[in-house]
Amino acid sequence: MAFDMQRLMSRVNEAGPNGCWLWTGGQTANGYGKYSGIVAHRAVWSALVGPVPRDLQLDHLCGVLLCVNPDHLDPVDQFENMRRRFASYDRCASGHLYTTENTYIRPNGHRDCRTCIRGRVRSCQLRR
């Protein structure tokens, strides 16, 4: 896909924190930059690096969804992208910290919060 480089890069602020190139154009509902019907980071990658393989996604290594700096993007499959995303969370959905003492690792590798597990067990015992 060919891009108008001047138009594309006119929506990029290369003075973002930590070397991020921040997208200043439109955004998708979930916070990614949007450009000509595709996500902006994919457009910038395609224009500057080359096409992204069909089965891969671009993972934001910096964690900034509006960042389009190719140096901050890593082509990975969906499973790896999701694994990295959830591994970066330091708290469970209830807000308890994932510490060594408070984290149970399931056989499938997913984490559980021991505080929440204890709460669910107590809740089940009270209903009996």
Image (tube, rainbow, N blue to C red):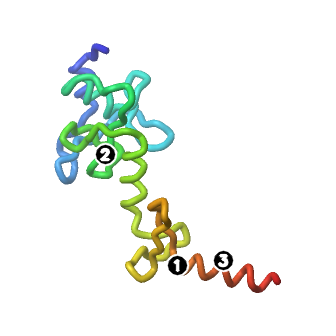
Residue that mark 1 sits on: 114
Gap between marks 1 and 3 measured at Cα: 10 Å
Label 1 CA crowd tier, 10 Å (few <14, some 14–19, many 20+): some
Name the foreground residue: 19 vs 48.
48
Q: Which mark is residue 34?
A: none
Vertical placement of residue 115 versus 70, above or below: below
Residue drawn at (42%, 45%) of the image: 79
Amino acid type, callout 3: Arg
Name the foreground residue: 20 vs 26.
20
Q: Is residue 31 left or right of residue 70?
A: right
Confirm or deny contact between disc 1 and disc 3 (CB under 8 A): no
Residue that mark 2 sits on: 60
Location of residue 128 (image quadrant): bottom right
Vertical placement of residue 18 versus 95, above or below: above
Amino acid type, callout 1: Arg
Vertical placement of residue 52 versus 122, above or below: above
Q: Secondary structure at mark 1?
A: helix
Gap between marks 2 and 1 measured at Cα: 30 Å
| Direction right: furthest residue | 128
Amino acid type, callout 2: His
Residue that mark 3 sits on: 120
Whole-percent x, y for residue 49 in the image: 19, 27
